[in-house]
């Protein structure tokens, strides 16, 4: 009986220990589940840095949790910590090797580091798991694009869209490819389609805003990128795009604020720092420009392509700084030659300071091509009366279509559309196929109230020049004209 009592006591203690262990394990699972939910919620609202700590803790507590490791990888990638994201995805794929999105995400992480050889197999695997899987084809297209094989990239993007007409990322990435290649009208069509199939797709709105900015549709560009910011306020890339759009419009203070807003979200963001460096360069504050680039280069997360681009930008700014110092010293001492003043005027023009550029160039008694350059600087400086006077003189000495067009543009800015129209007609007499002359003639006719003539001119322009940024502008104008057939 004593032995039976002892055995029963030991058995009871063992059961109690197992129950305590089970209870503790249950608490751990419950805590890990809570942490995963917390991290996923932060990830979905775009707060990647807030998402990482709870997901890291959950992954360490629950080693076999696929969601913990997968979302940890996504959050790390969102924070541009791609090498760490690869580690998290590796564990996630060990747990679920056939997970489609995890394979695509792993490919994206390698591709973001510029390693196409490592990225490609994961997209291929996803494509084998589900043939013609659009995300896999889109990934392979981006690999081809990174390898400078645009023809293959376009074919793969088109296959992705054929597989799923509603797959907005493929429209966006193909549109972005065309945008980089200068095919703005094709880019706009694809990007408009991206946000048509998914109106809440912020990356598509971002790229569409960039395309509008390149086309000169300033109001549409700003309105479009604002929508992207409203949808994803914590994505710094949208603030960068806003900065680039505003900088292209010459709104330097607004661009600076947008780049700073991006920096507030991600202090080392290369494009934001590059934008602030360009603003420093334009202001002649080279020290500030270098400081911005160096801060970006010091960020451990920087990828190879961004490092190369920033290093190239820094080298160019250094060369400009040294050249500017030499020319400034020569001008200040009174020893500057005419060639020095011409060179310094070109430098000031590159900073967007066309008033100074015009004054410097005018002081050299410019002749030939420099005289035409002076007229251009005057126009860009908003001194349209002076620009018209000089262009009118140049057209007499050199009857050329481009000079007549520039004179007409100056007159249009002065509000004299009748004389502007005459200048554009003279340009077409010299060169009947001159595209800008036809485009600006239609604009002048429209401002003069000759809607029917303007519509006819625009249609003739589209017949001769059906593609390109100007064609896209003309289609939009025609679509708004009362009674005009839709182009």
Image (cartoon, rainbow, N blue to C red):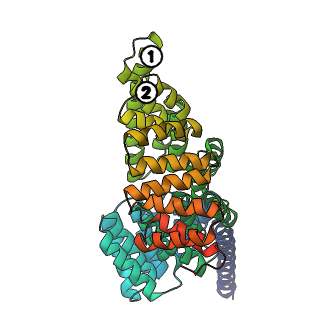
Task: Name the image quarter holding the N terminus.
Answer: bottom right
Pointer 1 and pointer 2: residues touching (CB < 8 Å)?
A: yes
Look at 45% across and 42% down and name the residue there.
297
Does residue 233 appear to the left or right of 250 in the view shown? Answer: right
Position of 437 relative to 128 (above/below): above
User: Residue 281's x, y, as percent?
Assistant: 50, 35
User: Residue 415's x, y, as percent?
Assistant: 64, 49
What number is the disc on residue 474? none
Q: Earlier in the sequence, mark 1 or mark 2?
A: 1
Does residue 92 appear to the left or right of 55 in the view shown? Answer: left
Look at 53% across and 64% down and name the residue there.
207
Give the mark count.
2
Does residue 308 appear to the left or right of 54 in the view shown? Answer: left
Residue 268: in sight, yes or no? no
- The one nearer the camera, 178 or 337, is 337
User: Residue 92's x, y, as percent?
Assistant: 48, 74
What number is the disc on residue 331? 1
Q: Say which residue label 2 marks.
A: 344
Residue 1: in sight, yes or no? yes
- Dot 1: what SS? helix
- The one nearer the camera, 119 or 201, is 201
Q: CA distance from mark 1 to mark 2?
A: 9 Å
Look at 62% across and 64% down and name the residue there.
446
Position of 221 relative to 309 (above/below): below
Q: Residues within 10 Å of mark 2 (few under 14, many from 20)?
A: many
């Amino acid at each position: 009986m004593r032995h039976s009592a002892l055995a029963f006591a030991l058995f009871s203690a063992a059961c109690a220990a197992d129950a305590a262990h089970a209870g503790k394990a249950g608490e751990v699972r419950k805590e890990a589940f809570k942490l995963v939910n917390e991290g996923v919620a932060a990830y979905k609202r775009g707060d990647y840095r807030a998402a990482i700590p709870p997901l890291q803790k959950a992954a360490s507590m629950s080693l076999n949790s696929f969601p913990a490791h997968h979302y940890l990888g996504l959050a790390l990638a969102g924070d541009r910590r791609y090498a760490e994201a690869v580690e998290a995805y590796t564990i996630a794929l060990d747990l679920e090797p056939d997970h489609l999105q995890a394979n695509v995400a792993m490919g994206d992480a390698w591709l973001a580091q510029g390693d196409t050889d490592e990225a490609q197999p994961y997209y291929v695997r996803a494509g084998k798991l589900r043939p013609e899987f659009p995300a896999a084809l889109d990934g392979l297209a981006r690999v081809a694009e990174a390898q400078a094989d645009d023809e293959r990239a376009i074919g793969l993007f088109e296959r992705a869209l054929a597989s799923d007409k509603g797959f907005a990322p493929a429209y966006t990435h193909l549109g972005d490819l065309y945008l980089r290649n200068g095919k703005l009208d094709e880019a706009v069509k694809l990007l408009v389609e991206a946000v048509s199939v998914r109106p809440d797709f912020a990356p598509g709105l971002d790229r569409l805003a960039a395309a509008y900015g390149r086309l000169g549709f300033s109001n549409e560009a700003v309105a479009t990128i604002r929508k992207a910011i409203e949808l994803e306020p914590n994505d710094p890339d949208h603030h960068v795009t806003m900065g680039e759009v505003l900088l292209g419009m010459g709104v330097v203070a607004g661009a600076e604020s947008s780049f700073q807003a991006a920096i507030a979200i991600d202090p080392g963001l290369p494009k934001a720092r590059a934008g602030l460096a360009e603003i420093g360069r334009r202001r002649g504050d080279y020290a500030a420009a270098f400081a911005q680039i160096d801060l970006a280069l010091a960020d451990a997360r920087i990828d190879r392509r961004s490092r190369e681009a920033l290093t190239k930008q820094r080298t160019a700014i250094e060369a400009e700084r040294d050249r500017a110092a030499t020319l400034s010293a020569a001008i200040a001492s009174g020893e500057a030659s005419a060639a020095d003043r011409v060179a310094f005027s070109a430098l000031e023009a590159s900073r967007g300071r066309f008033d100074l550029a015009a004054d410097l160039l005018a002081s050299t008694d410019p002749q030939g091509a420099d005289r035409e350059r002076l007229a251009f600087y005057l126009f860009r400086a908003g001194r349209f009366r002076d620009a018209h006077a000089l262009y009118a003189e140049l057209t007499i000495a050199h009857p050329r279509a481009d000079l007549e067009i520039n004179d007409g543009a100056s007159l249009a800015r002065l509000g004299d559309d009748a004389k502007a129209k005459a200048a554009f007609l003279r340009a077409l007499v010299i060169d009947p196929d001159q595209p800008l002359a036809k485009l600006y003639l239609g604009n002048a006719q429209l401002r003069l109230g000759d809607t029917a003539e303007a519509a006819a001119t625009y249609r003739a322009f589209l017949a001769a020049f059906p593609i390109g940024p100007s064609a896209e502008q003309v289609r939009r104008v025609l679509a708004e004209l009362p009674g005009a057939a839709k182009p």
